[in-house]
Image (spheres, rainbow, N blue to C red):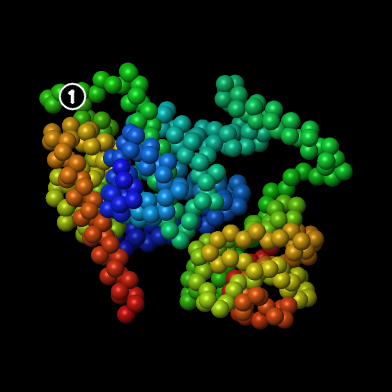
Amino acid sequence: MDYARPELIDALAAQHAAGTLRGGARRRYEALLPSHPALRAAHVRWQERLMPLAASLPPQAPPHRVWQRIEARLWPAAADTPLPWWQRLAAWRGLTALATAASVALAVIVAQPERVQPPVVVVLQGTGGAAQGVNTFVASVSGDGRALVTRPLLPVSVEADRVLELWSVPPDGAPRSLGLISSAGATVIARDRLPATLLKGGTAALAVSLEPPGGSPTGAPTGPVLYAGKLQL
Amino acid sequence: MADALDAQWNERNRELGALLARTALGDRGAFARLYERSSSHLFAVVLRIQRDRAVAEDLLQDIYVSVWKAAGGFDAARSQPMTWLASIARNRAIDSLRRAQTQPMLLSTTRDDDDGPDAIDRQPDDSPGPLELLDRACDARELQRCMEGLTRAQRQCVALAFYDGLSHAEVAEHLHEPLGTVKSWLRRALLALKTCLDGALARDAAAMGS
């Protein structure tokens, strides 16, 4: 099949969405998808066109054991529901791997035997009301307070000569810049920019402001604050 | 009715989008909620194509393990969350049929036109037929108008392929039509849908621009 011809690409994506692309053709299609931008674009468009049909199927609640097995597979050590021994094989394997990793890690972190804390997630709501729509930013802080990732729920449209800047807002005193963040995708904030007290009461809220290129020239937010969310520990 | 369903669909997508974004950041609680809010829909999609409940349960497991691992690849700018989730579920279900077909025991799908099992025989009695599902889906979407532009045979092809996961050959067998005819019906149906839906999109865009 000649994957360079646009009408063929479109026909293949259509058949894939309808479900009739089968066998070798289907395998080739799926293998090519990640590395073929035109095919991927056609693929997404066809999925969007046809997939709303699935909404009309009457929902069927799966039995609870499905969720238990998902948890057991993703987090073998955390599964507290008893399973038949043959399903615990995976858990055993996971535990063995974990034990090996742990014995290596132990040598390194023996001085700080703190348990791994779950990440803290902050939802930054839009402050502009209806005009801004219902978009939100999500910021996730790792349990140890040493990594922060932000991501808009939907891409935010920002004028070409404006950027978004993330701020740590202390309980009292001036906000501190954590750096510029992407308006379209995930941004990982450099560890050295995070205040050491981020999860220890030093930050009451996170906020996103609109700034000139390069960020605020004054060290304090100069543009409007578009998104803000409280840090709840 | 259509507006209410549309609103419901949009609301659900907004909620699932937020949960997916948090799942991508490793939030297990959000993932659990995502499962709670979407699993009965995905199970319906899978079960419709893969009728063996035990196999369907295993597939649902695989699907959510993939969702957890791939949530970071979900692009809210290009896909609706429900579309993204349902397409993962459909792919897995269709792939499972392909694997089942390679097993000798199940190769006995009849070639007989008279008394072979067909798609309708495979429906449990209380589950809606493919055309009925199509009508329901269309209540809520622009698709309705576009589907109405198709012939009944074209509509039936789309419904059998989409809902029941039938291949070209199986659709042909079910409708007692030659394979070539069915292929061309489906090809034309998809082309017509595309033209119609894209036309509607273009009109919406023009209306917003004016």
Residue that appears at 66% across and 81% down: A222
> Is residue A82 shown to the viewer in this render?
no
Q: In which quarter of the image is the C terminus of chain B?
A: bottom left
Give the quarter of the image for residue A211: bottom right
Q: Give the camera-side residue of B149 and B15.
A: B149
Give the quarter of the image for residue A172: bottom right
> Is residue B71 shown to the viewer in this render?
yes
Callout 1: residue from which chain?
B
Q: As drawn, which residue projects farthest toward the top?
A: B105
Q: As drawn, which residue projects farthest toward the right?
A: A111
Q: In this view, does B152 lie above or below A155?
A: above
Residue that appears at 52% across and 57% down: B18
Label 1 packing within 10 angstroms: few (<14), some (14-19), many (20+): few
Label 1, secondary structure: give it: loop
Q: Give the camera-side residue of B170 and B60.
A: B170
Residue at the spot of label 1: B111
User: Residue B192 placed where, x, y %?
Assistant: 20, 55
Q: Give the camera-side residue of A30 and B161.
A: A30
Residue that appears at 30% across and 75% down: B207
Left or right of A32? Residue A214 is: right
Left or right of A112? Residue B4 is: left
User: Residue B82 placed where, x, y %?
Assistant: 42, 51
Left or right of B105? Residue B25 is: right
Give the quarter of the image for residue B199: bottom left
Q: In which quarter of the image is the N terminus of chain B?
A: bottom left
